[in-house]
């Protein structure tokens, strides 16, 4: 039986449209691993970035439903307050704090990490979900290209600035299936050469996230912090309808809801199954990080990214 479901799951994945759409979880839930135990996160705190809407809010809702105390991170107080109202409507027992922090601003990230270190004795998990797809090249307060700052530099700085607060805990990086279409850039992480495309910048940095998460896993293994990256498939969120209206219109009827996109994030934070560290997931199953074994990044290219990121952030 397992061979049949393995084969079917593989076919869904390789077809892309079926696996990434709402068809994926509708079929896979017949064989995927068990739901996390009710209440498994009681007494635990989880930070979710980009939680003012979309997948981040759905993630926070799923985690709060399992008993977690969630900290919703976003750039805007009003949007966070609206998200909190929605969260409490969905999970009346939810415990949620609102944290304003612009993940693309390295000074703000350091200040936020210092606050968390002061306020919390320990942190069960950090979910890097905040994402952007800018229409033209924009830069962060420190002058870094915006997708690189938001998806790569800010998350790297936050993860390492938290230090042993995350010891024994988990880090989950929300990447994108779009990264399959792009190799790791050899250099020019700031996208200064060629004609800028927001979708290319987005996909390149989503690839960087997956490569970097594997390195974080090695770096943090000694303190018992597990690190995983994942992709949510195609989910109906403000990010998709606002940034990719053409895609949202065509794919609209088959998009998953936000809860379906967030399912594997919640599962990775909460499951008690032995899932190791340093893996890439989709729909509760570890996946290959390349669609086919071509354009795989070299060790030297990985090391160059690591050097660039540690230099730009001053971390670890
Ligand atoms: N939806 C999908 O189908 C899909 C597919 C693949 C990957 N993903 C990934 O899933 C994640 C969530 O996507 P989504 O579709 O839910 O997007 P979304 O609806 O646009 O939500 C993005 C969230 O990120 C926050 N954010 C953006 N820049 C930020 C910054 N600098 N600092 C702090 N928060 C920031 C936004 O909050 P404020 O604007 O309020 O600050 C918002 O809460 C992203 O990483 C995206 O790449 C989504």
Image: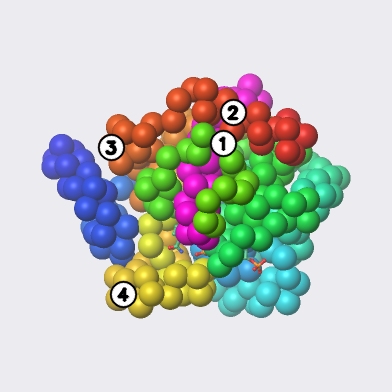
Q: Earlier in the sequence, mark 3 or mark 4?
A: 4
Magenta stretch: helix, strand or loop mostly: helix
Secondary element under disc 4, as helix, strand or loop, is helix
Position in image of residue 217 (x %, y %):
56, 30
At 26% from the left and 49% from the top, the residue drawn is: 13
Crowdedness of circle 1 by 10 Å Cα count: few (<14), some, many (20+)?
few
Disc number lying in front (1 or 4):
1
Mark 2 C-beta to ligand 1 under 8 Å: no
Q: Earlier in the sequence, mark 1 or mark 3?
A: 1
- Spatial distance from mark 1 to mark 3, Cα to Cα? 23 Å
- Spatial distance from mark 1 to mark 4, Cα to Cα? 34 Å
Crowdedness of circle 3 by 10 Å Cα count: few (<14), some, many (20+)?
few
246 relative position to 124: left or right: left
At 68% from the left and 75% from the top, the residue drawn is: 79
According to the picture, the residue beneath numbered tag 2 turns out to be 304
In reply to whether residue 209 is colored magenta, the answer given is: yes
According to the picture, the residue beneath numbered tag 4 turns out to be 250
Disc number lying in front (3 or 2):
2
Instruction: Give the residues in magenta.
Output: 197-224
């Amino acid at each position: 039986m397992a061979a049949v479901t393995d084969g079917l799951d593989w076919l869904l994945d390789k077809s892309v449209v079926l696996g990434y759409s709402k068809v994926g979880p509708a079929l896979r839930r017949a064989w995927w691993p068990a739901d996390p135990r009710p209440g498994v996160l009681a007494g635990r705190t989880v930070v979710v970035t980009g939680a003012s809407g979309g997948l981040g809010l759905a993630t926070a809702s799923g985690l709060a439903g399992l008993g977690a105390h969630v900290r919703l991170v976003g750039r805007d107080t009003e949007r966070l307050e609206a998200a909190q109202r929605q969260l409490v409507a969905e999970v009346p027992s939810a415990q949620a704090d609102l944290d304003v922090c612009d993940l693309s601003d390295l000074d703000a990230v350091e200040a936020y990490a210092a606050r968390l270190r002061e306020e919390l004795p320990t942190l069960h998990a950090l979910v890097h979900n905040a994402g952007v797809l800018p229409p033209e090249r924009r830069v962060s307060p420190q002058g870094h290209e915006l997708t690189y700052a938001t998806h790569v530099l800010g998350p790297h700085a936050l993860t390492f600035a938290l230090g042993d607060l995350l010891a024994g805990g988990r880090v989950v990086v929300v990447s994108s299936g779009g990264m399959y279409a792009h190799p790791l850039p050899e250099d020019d992480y700031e996208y200064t050469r060629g004609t800028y495309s927001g979708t290319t910048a987005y996909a390149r940095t989503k690839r960087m996230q997956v490569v970097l998460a594997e390195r974080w896993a090695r770096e943090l293994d000694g303190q018992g912090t597990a690190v995983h990256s994942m992709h949510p498939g195609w989910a109906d969120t403000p990010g998709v309808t606002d940034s990719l209206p053409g895609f949202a219109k065509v794919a609209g009827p088959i998009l998953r809801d936000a809860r379906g996109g967030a399912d594997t994030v919640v599962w990775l934070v909460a499951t008690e199954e032995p899932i190791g560290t340093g893996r890439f997931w989709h729909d509760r199953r570890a996946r290959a990080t390349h669609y086919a074994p071509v354009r795989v990044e070299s060790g030297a290219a990985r090391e160059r990214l690591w050097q660039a990121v540690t230099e730009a952030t001053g971390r670890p």
